Amino acid sequence: MNRLLNRPEESMNEMIDGYIQCYPDKYERLDGYKVILRKNLEDKVSVIIGAGGGNEPWPIGYVGEGMADACACGDVFTAPAARAILNTLRSVPNKDGVLCVATNHAGDVLNFELVAELAEMEGIKTRRVYVADDITSADLTEKRERRGIAGVSLVLKIAAAAAKTGLTLDEVAEVAQKVSDNTYTCSVTTSPAYVLETGKPAYDLPEGKTEYGMGFNGEMGIERTDISSADKIAEKIINMIIEDANLKKDDEVIYFLNPFMATTFIESYIIAGKCLKIFADRGIKVYASHVDTMFATQGAGGFSVTILKVNEKIKEYYNKPVNSPSFRYWEQGERK
């Protein structure tokens, strides 16, 4: 696949600079680091995120009003450096503490935990929540050992809304962890992603095959099969989530379809419609539905589905407004 790059090793730096140049009233860069900060930060519990590039627009697109206050970036598929995370903590309002939200991957967890100890020595209190929503990556009995994928968008949005209401650091962390524990995601890949530096496929997925549960960085999935119809694929994904989340009649959820970058608008809404019909047939109430590419590897085909079990307080936080060029959101009205 052809790419539009200058020097591949500088792609993240150039992307951050270009993003800030496009939105100079909203963002600034922390000098010397792959860190983006929201301007005009409020005194409250700050919420920061960190991750490598490659699962776009996560993480940089999640910084904005009502979302993350700052983001420490690594290179593509590489955890952000501990020094970058520490300087991010120093640069946001931190007297009330800082919540760190990341996906549950070894490098991210290692660096955030190391930085938390260093920050504590400087009097900066942190809490960390590692989103672990990929139902195919570990058994339900080890839910917090699962990989973190697209469900981070819901966890972050709700955690940031809670922080903005004036809750304490421990209270915000409790909200975020509860949301993470009630978030479930399953994915199917229909064509391979590519390596940014070379343009070559990142892994082997033959024509006519699909793989369920493949990691967003190319980790092996749980099942590879011949491709089938959109309806059958949607049924399989939703049934896996319903079983894992133990969803029952009259349970209420937020539903999020995350199309990968090679999946078209047409395909996305065929899948979305079928998923919503299955929920309706099962008597599962969908409080809100959202279709948007929020966590996708370059060039891959397929999609993920995320559901979040909700209560009235979670719905209240979910409906708080956000303002980010890369995170689109509509307030939910009553579904007919």
Image (cartoon, helix red, strand yellow):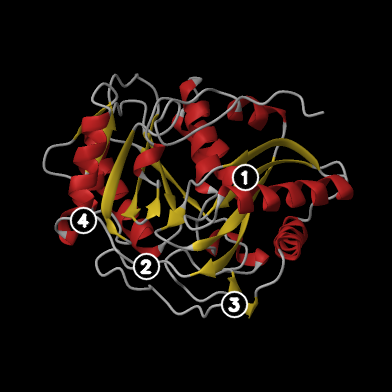
Can you give x and y, in whole percent of width and height, for residue 227 in the image? 65, 73
Can you give x and y, in whole percent of width and height, for residue 65 in the image? 41, 25
Disc 2 target residue: 194
Disc 4 target residue: 5
Q: Amino acid at mark 4?
A: Leu
What's the distance in space between the residues labelled 1 and 2, CA to CA? 25 Å
Mark whose residue sits in front, 3 or 2: 3
Q: Is residue 243 above or below residue 36?
A: below
Q: Amino acid at mark 3?
A: Gly
Can you give x and y, in whole percent of width and height, for residue 102 in the image? 42, 49
Q: Secondary structure at mark 1?
A: strand
What's the distance in space between the residues labelled 2 and 4, CA to CA? 14 Å
Whether label 4 touches label 3, CB < 8 Å: no
Mark whose residue sits in front, 1 or 2: 2
Disc 1 target residue: 256
Instruction: Give the side of residue 322 with respect to residue 201, left or right.
Output: right
Q: Which is more N-terminal, label 4 or label 2?
A: 4
* Picture residue at 31% right of the left edge, 22% below the top: 41
Q: Amino acid at mark 1?
A: Phe
Q: Is residue 49 visible?
A: yes
Disc 3 target residue: 208
Q: Nearer the viewer, residue 216 or 315?
A: 216
What's the distance in space between the residues labelled 1 and 4, CA to CA? 31 Å
Q: Please rate how many residues cluster around mark 1, counting C-alpha atoms within 10 Å: few if below 14, some from 14 to 19, many from 20.
A: many
Q: Please rate how many residues cluster around mark 2, counting C-alpha atoms within 10 Å: few if below 14, some from 14 to 19, many from 20.
A: many
Q: Is residue 165 above or below residue 29?
A: above
Q: Which is more N-terminal, label 1 or label 3?
A: 3
Quarter assignment of residue 44: top left
Instruction: Give the side of residue 317 with respect to residue 323, left or right.
Output: right
